[in-house]
Image (spheres, rainbow, N blue to C red):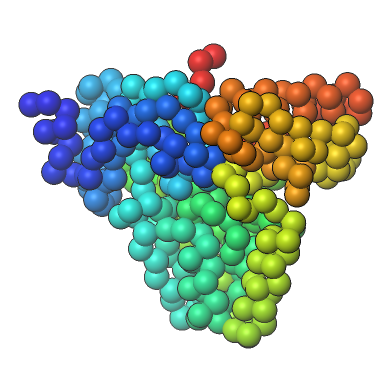
Amino acid sequence: MTLIDKLQPYADIEINESLKKHTTYRIGGMCKYFIYPKNIMCLMRIIGILKKEKLPIKVFGKGSNILCSDDDYNGVIICLDRYFTDFYFEKDGNCLVSAGMSIILLAHEAMKKSLTGLEFASGIPGTVGGALFMNAGAYKSDIAEIVQEVYVLKDDAICTMKKEELDFSYRHSIFQKHTDWIILGCRLYLQKGIQQDILDLMDSRRKRRMDSQPLDKPCAGSVFRNPSEKQAWQLIEEIGLRGKTIGGAMISNKHANFIVNENNAKATDVVELIELIQHSVKEKFGIDMITEVERFNWKK
């Protein structure tokens, strides 16, 4: 049987799929196999098949924090945002949620239940799995604050990892060191609140984002982590690079820590701007600028 024949019962499959369609940067080469597993059993069978075929594997959610190279990827991307989207609220505030669930949608569902704790996530355009991987956050809050445990596929078995095992810190988790582990879902703890107060906070933050961020352009959110010395956007502002363009990529005029795909940018255009910022900030302030954005399918 062909690889497609082997995988077909367990997943929806796209062949030679453009990664421009699956990243918020709208940048990337072609992917040989882009697949959506139908459930956890199917995922485990798929992993077994791919290991025998010795094909490289990458797990995607919504591609909101990834800069894919312009090269083609001769491997398999497993995407969880089609079928791994279940969520369940318990009476005590616990929320059981699958990794492919949109964290924005989850924040709104929590608000409908008058549950507070996810307001920070109401503007993060990724999945719960991606948020756990990056310890995503905003407005001085992050997902580590509400995680109780995470369900992980590792070493061909499903296990439960407690919060204390996850090595959470600023934009960091243990999953970044173990990219062969697959986040399946988690249990979050939310608290009872007043629905109107939760909604008002989400609305005020949405307006703040709309006013201050270039959300009308393809991008991946904040490019750099904030150093301890000063906000990343301030450092970029002070070296005079706001509005700087290389190829089709531009450092946003609206928010200097955003690099936007202004005009059919290539991945190399974005990387050149990243490296220009890093070099310039290091030269002027002696500060190392560390990226939040993950690079995928780049030659070493």
- Residue 190 in sight in this render: yes
Task: Locate the C terminus and report the quarter of the image it occupies.
Answer: top right
Across and down, in percent, residue 278 comes to: 77, 26
Task: Locate the N terminus and report the quarter of the image it occupies.
Answer: top left
Residue 11 lies in quadrant: top left
* Apparent side of residue 159 relative to residue 282 in the rendered image (left or right): left
Total numbered labels: 0
Across and down, in percent, residue 154 comes to: 38, 38
Say which of 279 and 140 sits in front.
279
The residue under the point 55% across, 27% down is 266
The residue under the point 34% across, 39% down is 78
* Apparent side of residue 95 relative to residue 211 in the rendered image (left or right): left
The residue under the point 51% across, 60% down is 103
Say which of 167 and 127 sits in front.
127
The residue under the point 61% across, 31% down is 248
Task: Decide: is 93 above or below 211.
Answer: below
Across and down, in percent, residue 163 comes to: 56, 52
Task: Decide: is 130 above or below 297.
Answer: below
* Apparent side of residue 19 relative to residue 114 in the rendered image (left or right): left
- Residue 134 in sight in this render: no
* Apparent side of residue 80 relative to residue 214 in the rendered image (left or right): left
The residue at the far top in this view is 300
